[in-house]
Image: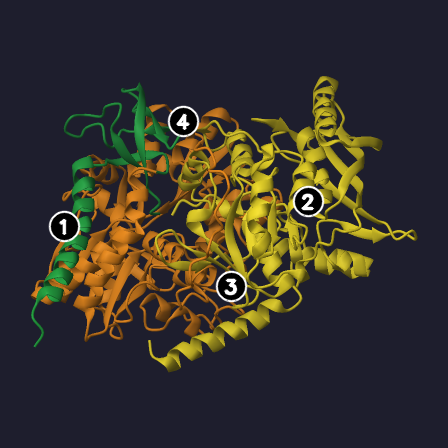
């Protein structure tokens, strides 16, 4: 069962009962956040979580997300560098 | 993968296509929800039970309605539809709106000007008359907006529990102008596929309104009468080949039907599909594909490439076509297949629906 | 959609692909993705046909819906057809056939079968219907099991006695081991299950490089995630490394989710063995409720037939699951065995290799030319 969707916490309804409202592109659902509330920093409105069958499974680490994308983008530039180097090398 | 393996795969796929083209066999002994979903199971039921018994050329053409020729030479379009939607009221509309617009649109898809309708009601004992009034008021308003008159009808009352509140059946007639000829078989490779606006609204609106999935989203139905939009479209693009409204089974079902009937391939561009972000979000959460979700105020049009720009302009100038977009084109190969070029750069087929699209958890 | 759209960028994909093509030159690589969600993504976005021919993806057995044996589905239907029962299930389980049809058909015959999105919805139904017995069909790997566990704890806490579970949760490591032990398998690495790992972390996969000498990269579910994970595997091989790496760092902590693991351990224990459709009996591979939660165990509350139903003889799912044959090479693929009339596990849910290929992958071997879209006269308003 692998369908996990990223959503943003917009309201903590009841911290004791672990209930929060999460928003996915304008669609809202109540989600149980009991599995992520104990994380360092707790859970705040504005945090992003991965939702699966009505539960938040993990907080999405925005820094890691950005660094994954950076790594991917850099692959492009590394390739561009190679192309440039190749085309400026003297032919045999 | 070497060439041998490649051609072996092609052979297998051809064999499977031959198998799929056989007349759909009905093996079930009892009706189940798949038979009403508009996909393969529905087709099998219609073929084995209804076509088998009612055999005639008009019925066999299996369009949304029938086009009949009068002795005078004039053509009349005739269509019928049943409405059982639950819940009966949902954001933006009710069963009343659907009951009128559904039949109006079936007529419009045949190029007719919808004019007269009948309405039959099967009502459960104990149903509140106040609610009946509301539904009928919605029907009256929709009929006015669509320019049709409800000229005849029928009412039956059944025992408590024998039906779910109220079921409505409407039938409609309209004249098809002499110059209009719409036929799947006139579709050619190179033709463009246009959708009149954003997809997925109605099906998602109803799913959310049912409440089982506890989603909150501001998604109203898109139910609307398309008679006028079609008139404007046909005036601007008189050689439009084919029209169909993507109701039950969605855009994917309409395009698969077209690919089969015309024996062509349809290729769509995922990045061109118009869809509201919020509807897309709801579909992602539920794991359903918006291409299979019902629409009640949209049409799919196939037009020759040199009329595509004019068709688009005409639709975008109309309130029910502001988001019209070219989403794909017709090709000759592989025949009978619908392909989606994915946003990411790959491709996949969009097959005929199997049963109801159930939300996926995996 | 944030955290989704960025990972579907075709330009970035082309960059990664050029690196993959470069590294994969001269050899034929077979990488297995274990998780059904990956199989689904791969086919949905058409990832296989943008990869170079030197990289082949083999679709593994990680579809928890597919592997439920027919006999267990029959048991579920038996419970659903018991008078006074409201039987709740995830959508994708409802079309899985047992020996005598599926839950949707049972519903058509009059059983009160309801689809739920979350186990908590099932508990709510139980609270709202105190005179009925509500049963939840619990399926899924370690991704889903903690949610079921929390629901059982809530039932206990709220004193809800008319709620029970038909537990079919399974764990990911045993089938992975079974695949690795298989003699006719030749793989070069694995794409690890991204969402299971949010719970169990990356450590449990260490035995894969350590004992079997194959690299494993835990991967996310968007196209760029999968491509990046493949690149990471190829880089390991190129540099002579062999380890567990994490591509899905934005969602997978190295140690997983300790709270979820704690709850899992509190509520569930391992069954001695469990039958996996297509793979046979695997020991210590499935969960059942611990004794103190027996009152919420549907298998104890209801009597189930418990009959073992074998897959039809024509079924070649075992070979497909291990990547020995492709779906279209199975003798019954597409004819006797289709998504509507599935014979074996690989066709049974949209994540199974055969269903995914049938529904999405046929006719896509060759890249199709993009459609030329007309210029529209007026730019539509953004929503």
**Which numbered disc, 2 or 3, marks the residue closer to the eye?**
2
Residue labelled with disc 4: C160
Q: Earlier in the sequence, mark 3 or mark 1?
A: 1
- Examine the rendered structure and indicate whether residue C341 appears above or below residue B270: below
| Chain B as rendered: colour | yellow
Residue labelled with disc 3: C338
> Could you tell whether C148 is left or right of B188 in the image?
left
Closest to the observer: C174 or B13?
Answer: B13
Q: CA distance from mark 3 to mark 1?
A: 38 Å
**Which numbered disc, 4 or 3, marks the residue closer to the eye?**
3
Q: CA distance from mark 2 to mark 1?
A: 66 Å
Position of residue C146 measured from the top left corner of the image (x, y, whole percent): 29, 39
Residue C203 badge:
1
Q: CA distance from mark 4 to mark 3?
A: 41 Å
Helix, strand or loop for disc 2: helix
| Residue located at (8% from left, 65% from top) | C239
Tell me the subunit letter for badge 4: C
Q: CA distance from mark 2 to mark 4?
A: 65 Å
- Label 1, residues with CA under 10 Å away: few <14, some 14-19, many ≥20: few
| Chain A as rendered: colour | green
């Amino acid at each position: 069962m692998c369908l996990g969707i990223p959503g943003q916490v917009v309201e903590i309804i009841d911290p004791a009962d672990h209930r929060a409202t999460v928003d996915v592109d304008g669609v809202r659902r109540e989600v149980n956040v009991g599995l992520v509330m104990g994380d360092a920093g707790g859970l705040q409105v504005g945090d992003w979580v991965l939702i699966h069958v009505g539960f938040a499974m993990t907080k999405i680490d925005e820094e890691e997300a950005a660094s994954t994308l950076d790594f991917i983008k850099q692959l492009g530039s590394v390739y561009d560098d190679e192309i440039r180097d190749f085309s400026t090398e003297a032919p045999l | 993968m070497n060439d041998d393996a490649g051609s072996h795969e092609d052979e297998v796929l051809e064999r499977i296509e031959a198998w799929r083209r056989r007349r759909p066999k009905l093996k079930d002994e009892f009706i189940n929800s798949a038979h009403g979903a508009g996909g393969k199971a529905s087709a099998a039921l219609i073929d084995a039970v209804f076509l088998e018994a009612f055999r005639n050329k008009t019925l066999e053409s299996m369009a949304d309605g029938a086009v009949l020729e009068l002795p005078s030479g004039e053509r009349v379009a005739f269509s019928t539809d049943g409405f059982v939607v639950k819940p009966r009221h949902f954001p933006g509309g009710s069963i009343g709106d659907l009951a009128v617009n559904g039949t109006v649109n079936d007529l419009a898809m045949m190029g007719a000007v919808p004019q007269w309708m009948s309405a039959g009601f099967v009502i459960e004992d104990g149903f509140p008359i106040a609610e009946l009034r509301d539904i009928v008021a919605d029907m009256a308003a929709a009929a006015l907006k669509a320019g049709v008159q409800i000229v005849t009808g029928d009412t039956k009352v059944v025992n408590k529990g024998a039906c779910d509140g109220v079921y409505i059946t409407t039938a409609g007639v309209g004249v098809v102008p002499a110059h209009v000829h719409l036929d799947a078989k006139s579709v050619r490779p190179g033709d463009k596929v246009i959708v009149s606006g954003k997809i997925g609204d109605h099906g998602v609106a109803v799913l959310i309104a049912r409440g089982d999935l506890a989603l909150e989203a501001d998604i109203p139905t898109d139910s609307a009468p398309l008679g006028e939009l079609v008139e404007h479209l046909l005036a601007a693009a008189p050689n439009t080949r084919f029209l169909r409204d993507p109701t039950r089974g969605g855009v994917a079902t309409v395009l698969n039907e077209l690919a089969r009937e015309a024996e062509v391939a349809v290729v769509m561009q995922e990045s061109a599909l118009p869809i509201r972000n919020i509807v897309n979000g709801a579909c992602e959460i539920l794991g359903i594909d918006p291409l299979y979700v019902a629409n009640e105020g949209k049409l799919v049009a196939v037009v020759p490439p040199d009329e595509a720009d004019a068709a688009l302009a005409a639709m975008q100038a109309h309130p029910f076509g502001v988001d019209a977009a070219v989403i794909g084109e017709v090709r000759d190969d592989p025949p009978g297949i619908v392909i989606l070029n994915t946003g990411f750069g790959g491709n996949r087929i969009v097959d005929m629906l199997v049963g109801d699209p159930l939300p996926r958890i995996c | 959609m944030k955290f989704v759209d960025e990972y579907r960028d075709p330009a970035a994909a082309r960059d990664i692909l050029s690196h993959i093509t470069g590294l994969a030159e001269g050899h034929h690589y077979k990488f297995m993705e274990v998780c059904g969600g990956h199989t689904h993504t791969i086919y949905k976005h058409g990832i296989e046909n943008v990869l170079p021919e030197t990289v082949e993806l083999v679709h593994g057995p990680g579809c928890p819906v597919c592997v439920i044996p027919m006999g267990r589905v029959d048991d579920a239907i038996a419970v659903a057809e018991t008078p006074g029962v409201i039987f709740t299930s995830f959508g994708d389980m409802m079309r899985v056939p047992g020996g005598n049809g599926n839950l949707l058909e049972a519903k058509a015959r009059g059983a009160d079968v309801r689809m739920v999105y979350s186990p908590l919805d099932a508990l709510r139904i139980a609270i709202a219907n105190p005179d009925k017995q509500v049963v939840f069909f619990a399926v899924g790997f370690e991704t889903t099991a903690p949610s079921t566990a929390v629901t059982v704890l809530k039932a206990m806490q709220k004193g809800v006695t008319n709620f029970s579970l038909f537990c079919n949760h399974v764990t990911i490591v045993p089938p992975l081991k079974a695949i690795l032990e298989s003699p006719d398998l030749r793989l070069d690495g694995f794409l690890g299950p991204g969402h299971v790992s949010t719970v169990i972390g990356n450590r449990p996969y260490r035995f894969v490089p350590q004992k079997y000498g194959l690299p494993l990269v835990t991967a996310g579910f968007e196209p760029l995630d999968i491509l990046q994970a493949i690149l990471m595997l190829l880089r390991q091989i190129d540099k002579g490394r062999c380890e567990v790496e994490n591509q899905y760092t934005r969602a997978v902590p190295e140690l997983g989710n300790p709270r979820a693991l704690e709850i899992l351990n509190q509520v569930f224990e391992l069954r001695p063995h469990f039958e996996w459709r297509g793979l046979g009996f695997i020991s210590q591979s499935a969960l059942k409720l611990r004794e103190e939660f027996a009152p919420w165990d549907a298998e104890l509350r209801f009597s189930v037939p418990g009959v073992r139903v074998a897959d039809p003889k024509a079924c070649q799912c075992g070979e497909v699951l291990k990547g020995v044959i492709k779906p279209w090479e199975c003798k019954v693929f597409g004819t006797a065995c289709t998504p509507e009339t599935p014979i074996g596990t690989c066709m049974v849910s949209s994540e199974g290799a055969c269903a995914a290929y049938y529904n999405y992958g046929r006719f896509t071997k060759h890249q199709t030319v993009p459609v030329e879209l007309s210029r529209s006269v007026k730019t539509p308003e953004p929503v």
